Image: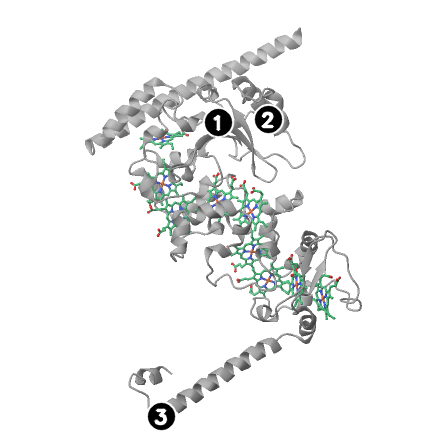
Amino acid sequence: MKNFRSKSNSRLSRPKVLILLSLFALALALVGKTLHAEENSLAKEDRACLACHDKAGLEKKLTNGESLSLQISTQAYTESMHKDASCEDCHDDLNAKTHGKTEVAITSKRAFSLSMRESCRTCHEKKFTEYEGSVHAALIAQGSKEAPLCSDCHNPHTVRSVKIPEPITATPCAKCHADIFKAYSQSVHGQARIANVKSAPLCSDCHQAHAVKAASLGTGVKDACLGCHKNAVTSHQEWLPNAELHFEAISCPTCHAPTAERRVNLRIYYGVDKQQVTEKVGVPKFEKRTDAADAKEMGLDERALWSLLKEFNQDGGDGKMVLRGRLEVRSGVEAHQLSEKSKALKDCNTCHKEGAAAFQSVSLTIAGPDGRPLRHGIQKDVLNSLTSMDSVRGFYAIGSTRIKLLDTLLVLVLLGAVCVPLGHMTVKRLFKNMREKLEAERAAAAAQAANQTTLDAQHADDDASK
Ligand code: HEC
Ligand code: HEC
Ligand code: HEC
Ligand code: HEC
Ligand code: HEC
Ligand code: HEC
Ligand code: HEC
Ligand code: HEC
Ligand code: HEC
């Protein structure tokens, strides 16, 4: 064939045209034959189903008034990844005698989908198990009518290979998370994807497709970023001191979604194994406790927060419960407005300044039973006192919360940073000093807190003996 083409540069002679035409006809015939063979490749039983079901307009009224289309396209089915499966592999509960002759009551589309959900398990055990651990499956277990089943993301009768490139609008996540999809499609990644950069992520590259977890739970999403941007720590370290610590205390979109509003999120952790505290299914405590502690709905103050933590500690924290602060953006949409690097937040003062905007909104979160955060407002002044309470171990943004001395140091540091390379040494030394100072203060605060607990305990003893 190759040979043939290379010769055809010159004008073709008549016999050659004839040969060409007959070859073409032969090819067509062959194609026709394979198509035919494809349809024939369906088992007799399946063709019997399709004889009734590949009819336009075949539909059924459901009890709730919805109408369910019953048409299955033979062509789409024979082109699908399930062409070798038989209808009855998944539809094994139909009554051959009465099917199609008597009506079977179906409550709603959702009820029908739910009744079919187990049908994927036998052949896709692994994906099924992954999915069962997802936030989506947890939502369904809680009775959500909107969270996706397998068939919401994959049409079982038309499913194509995931290797076939599709436009981003075909991602199944788009239909339910429309606002986030819109933000994503305008982001660096969405734009890259539209421009055919295959290595740029889709939703499932950051969140996974089946084992989707609540986005703010743990470090899954951050790990996904660093999985592709392997040099990120090193490249940020060039201008950002202790980049790793910053990455832990600040979510990536906080700096990379330049127009987003920011806030401080205090997350409750078990100190020992560094797991986020998760509320147990069916035992709602967080909302009850926070609502009780904050009757005026002004946000928890210092004392309310302190006693709330104690309560959670008594549930099994063993005195090891800590708050870990994180700067993040305020909404899910903003988390997806990632821009090119030149627009990213670089100004240290955005955070390391007294009264910085990001520190004006503070909330406390615990992971709900499905992993999604349950949230309650905290009075922003609490941040200042928190640092001395030792309950927000490891979260200061120097300057923004307190300590004038450190502010001055930071200015020096910044000046130092300008005078590279001599400055570089100074920066390092200054940071060392600053860190030592911070550590000393934290130790002092811890000692103070320990004293305080002993005092409390003594008071309690006194009270008891009265
Ligand atoms: C004689 C025509 C005919 C054949 C053959 C047929 N169906 Fe149906 N099918 C129908 C009709 C009509 C309905 C709607 C019945 C109703 O209103 O309850 C239906 C409904 C269904 C439904 C919806 C759920 C339900 O139970 O109502 C499924 C799924 C289905 N058919 C699958 C199949 C499969 C799989 C086969 C082959 C094994 C098949 N059908 C063969 C006519 C047919
Ligand atoms: C891989 C499993 C699988 C195979 C194979 C399969 N189905 Fe289905 N089918 C399903 C599931 C799951 C649903 C429910 C879809 C939903 O939730 O919307 C369904 C729904 C249907 C419906 C109701 C209309 C609809 O689209 O929801 C009909 C009719 C039907 N199937 C017919 C067939 C016929 C005919 C075949 C063979 C040509 C077939 N199915 C093969 C899994 C399968
Ligand atoms: C929220 C949407 C969603 C749900 C729910 C979902 N999937 Fe997927 N699935 C995807 C996406 C997106 C891909 C392609 C990207 C990937 O594999 O990471 C995919 C890929 C797959 C693949 C091909 C995997 C491969 O790598 O070859 C299979 C098989 C699959 N899904 C089966 C299932 C089954 C079975 C279920 C139900 C237990 C299910 N999916 C539920 C979105 C979903
Ligand atoms: C009878 C076995 C069987 C059942 C049941 C079944 N599948 Fe499949 N599925 C297959 C086979 C075989 C393939 C071909 C590719 C492969 O080997 O993974 C496939 C492929 C897929 C793919 C595309 C994978 C890819 O590589 O791109 C998806 C998505 C998928 N199935 C989803 C589902 C869903 C959703 C259900 C339940 C509604 C289901 N399957 C039920 C056998 C099955
Ligand atoms: C580049 C990685 C990335 C991609 C691609 C991505 N996300 Fe996200 N997503 C994130 C980050 C980061 C967060 C915020 C996580 C946090 O709070 O730490 C998030 C949060 C979410 C949330 C939770 C929102 C909330 O209210 O808290 C949902 C839902 C979500 N993403 C869905 C999607 C969907 C749907 C897509 C595709 C249209 C998508 N994501 C694409 C990184 C990504
Ligand atoms: C059929 C609708 C539907 C589809 C499709 C769907 N989701 Fe969801 N998803 C939901 C619903 C409903 C919730 C719970 C409400 C919420 O948090 O937005 C949810 C929650 C989430 C969450 C947890 C939100 C949080 O607070 O952290 C993430 C992450 C998520 N989805 C990602 C995805 C990804 C990625 C895809 C595609 C692979 C996808 N979803 C496809 C309906 C869907
Ligand atoms: C304190 C703000 C800040 C945080 C937090 C931050 N970045 Fe950046 N990032 C920047 C700035 C500013 C640049 C541009 C640097 C330059 O061009 O000099 C940048 C550049 C980048 C680049 C392009 C250059 C390169 O390194 O390849 C990537 C990719 C990147 N960041 C990813 C991330 C990821 C992933 C995270 C979270 C783990 C993150 N960033 C957290 C501010 C931040
Ligand atoms: C699947 C791999 C992948 C994942 C996961 C991923 N990225 Fe990217 N990212 C890319 C690619 C590829 C580009 C380059 C797009 C282009 O060519 O413009 C990019 C571009 C960027 C840029 C712009 C860099 C520049 O030079 O302007 C930033 C910032 C960025 N990513 C941050 C993130 C953050 C933050 C996350 C996690 C929330 C993340 N990325 C997750 C692959 C990924
Ligand atoms: C988006 C907000 C933000 C930006 C921008 C930012 N920082 Fe930070 N920085 C923080 C937070 C929050 C912490 C607290 C981390 C912790 O202790 O958990 C921190 C911690 C620090 C520390 C203490 C590190 C240690 O080892 O204990 C230094 C030093 C520092 N930042 C310097 C800088 C400099 C210099 C810049 C500008 C190049 C900068 N930061 C930009 C938020 C920011």
Q: Position of residue 247 (x, y in %)?
A: 40, 37
- Badge 1 marks a residue whose secondary structure is strand
- For badge 3, the amino acid type reads Arg
Ligand 7, seen in the image, is in the quarter at top left
**Which residue shows up at 37% across the image and 29% down it?**
351
Q: Position of residue 89 (x, y in %)?
A: 67, 65
Give the mark nearest the N terminus, 1 or 3: 3
Q: Is residue 347 visible?
A: yes
In the picture of the structure, the residue carrying the numbered disc 3 is 14
Give the mark nearest the N terminus, 2 or 1: 2
- For badge 1, the amino acid type reads Val
Q: Position of residue 202 (x, y in %)?
A: 46, 52
Q: Is residue 15 above or below residue 262?
A: below
**Which residue shows up at 44% across the image and 20% down it?**
384
Q: Is residue 314 visible?
A: no
Q: Position of residue 461 (x, y in %)?
A: 62, 11
Q: Quadrant of the C terminus?
A: top right
Residue 362 badge: 1
In the picture of the structure, the residue carrying the numbered disc 2 is 312
Color style of the picture? one colour
